[in-house]
Amino acid sequence: MLIDELRQHEEQQRVNYKQLLAFSCLADPRFCFVVYGGAAGGGKSWLGCDWLMRCCWAFPKTRWFVGRNNIKDSRESVLVTFGKVADSYGFRDYRTTDYGIRFANGSEIVLLDLTFYPKKDPLFERLGSKEFTGGWIEEAGEVHYMAFEVLKSRIGRHLNAEYGLEPKMLITCNPKKNWLYKYFYKPYIDGTLPEDCAFIQALVYDNPFITGDYIRSLESIAVKSLRLRLLLGKWEYENNQNALVDYDAILDCFTNDVGTGDGVRRISADLAMKGRDRFVAFDWTGMAGRLAIDKPYCTGKEIEADLRRESRRHGVRRSNIIADSDGLGQYLDSYLEGIKTFHGGAPAPDSTYFNLKSQCAFKLAEVINAGLLRIDCPEEVQPLIVEELEACLVARDVDADTSRKRIIDKREMKAVLGRSPDFFDPLMMRMYYEIVPQPKGIRVRVGQLA
């Protein structure tokens, strides 16, 4: 009934019925977070600008934000759309500034740079002192989860009590298999969306004001996965038919039961000194891995000391420590005698695989799909691990009848990620102990290691 009523009013309101539905959710005190979009052409930007313009003018001296992954995009996109929205209403009582939009009644919209800086500001501490009445994250699929987490704590802080306004955040997006999928879309589909959240799927066909040329441009997209996402709003798009692992199974790695595997304590490490990727190590109990070390800058001595400390702390035998076999791995083997050095290009125990790394990667995918892997790490690191597992657990496109099974090489992984897969490597190396027969030995007590 509500949808029919909204359809009848969309022409006179200058917005489509899905946007009107979003407005009703944004005005509803039950909802703190309203996610809108899930496809191209649904009127996401118009909705955001229209909503903020109304809020700013209705409540003088309030303070709102618009955040995107790139401040340049905000200026080039949001300010242009805002001008169109204002013109459609004949509204002139505002001016643009270096920081955003200032209204004649003292309200303002601040443009925020939500770029993720993993070395300089991984926790978005630059947002920690800001206070807003509410705000809008645009193109949220490009925004890091931690930005959303921090901004949640910054809304409802400026004149909300005086006006009786609930904290409110609009989140607009196209389908993206990241935190939006985990925290909003999948719960929406499963019927488990939190009571303070609303999800509104808006497609280009829901927007009567879009041009026919724009619709035809979406319909003509040749790449199937892109067409499914942008035209039809498909969140479970198959973006790579050679993917070895199910996306939902990757997400489950952070909540799976911990009682899987053989219970043996192990350490797997991807080594890096200053200027080379990251030094990452997982401490394992069976198939439960805890991110024990994650450092961007390390000397060889620091790496040795950190691994020695972890092995002593948890009683890990040298033969149950595995590290990559580049120059640093060889260096460590001479100081931490007895550790395993991982040679990914070595022959695989199973000759149907291209090399050892490929067999370990396929085994990792098998374990993840079976729900047997548990990863314990800070929440801000989870999106990086999810991204790496999805990007790296991909089979090389070969004829399975004539070629051995293999995964894409590291150059392809880096091209997809735009960085080195620092977390994937130690997770993959852990599978060495699952595919290579291990001699039975005597358990060592904590403190016995040198």
Image: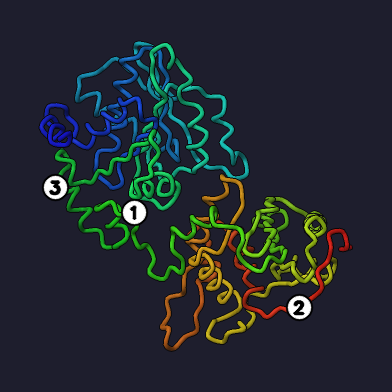
For marks 1 and 2 on the same chain, the one whose residue lies earlier in the sequence:
1
Picture mark count: 3
The disc label shown at residue 212, or none: 3
Q: Quadrant of the N terminus?
A: top left
SS state under label 3:
helix
The residue mark sitting in front, 1 or 2, is: 2
**Mark 3 packing: few (<14 Cα in 10 Å), some, or many (20+)?**
few
The residue mark sitting in front, 2 or 3, is: 2
Q: Which three-letter amino acid code belongs to the residue tagged 2?
A: Lys
Q: In this figure, which residue is indicated by the disc labeled 1?
A: 235
Comparing 312 with 204, the one in front is 312
SS state under label 1:
loop
Residue 305: % across, % down:
82, 56
Compared across the picture, whether 311 is left or right of 165 comes to: right
For marks 2 and 3 on the same chain, the one whose residue lies earlier in the sequence:
3
**Mark 2 packing: few (<14 Cα in 10 Å), some, or many (20+)?**
few
Residue 55: % across, % down:
33, 20
Residue 404: % across, % down:
50, 84
Q: Which three-letter amino acid code belongs to the residue tagged 3?
A: Gly
Comparing 84 with 349, the one in front is 349
The disc label shown at residue 408, or none: none
Residue at image location 49% in from the left, 80% down from the top:
405
Measure the C-alpha gap from mark 3 to mark 1: 24 Å
Q: In this figure, which residue is indicated by the disc labeled 2?
A: 440
Residue 319: % across, % down:
77, 71
The residue mark sitting in front, 3 or 1, is: 1
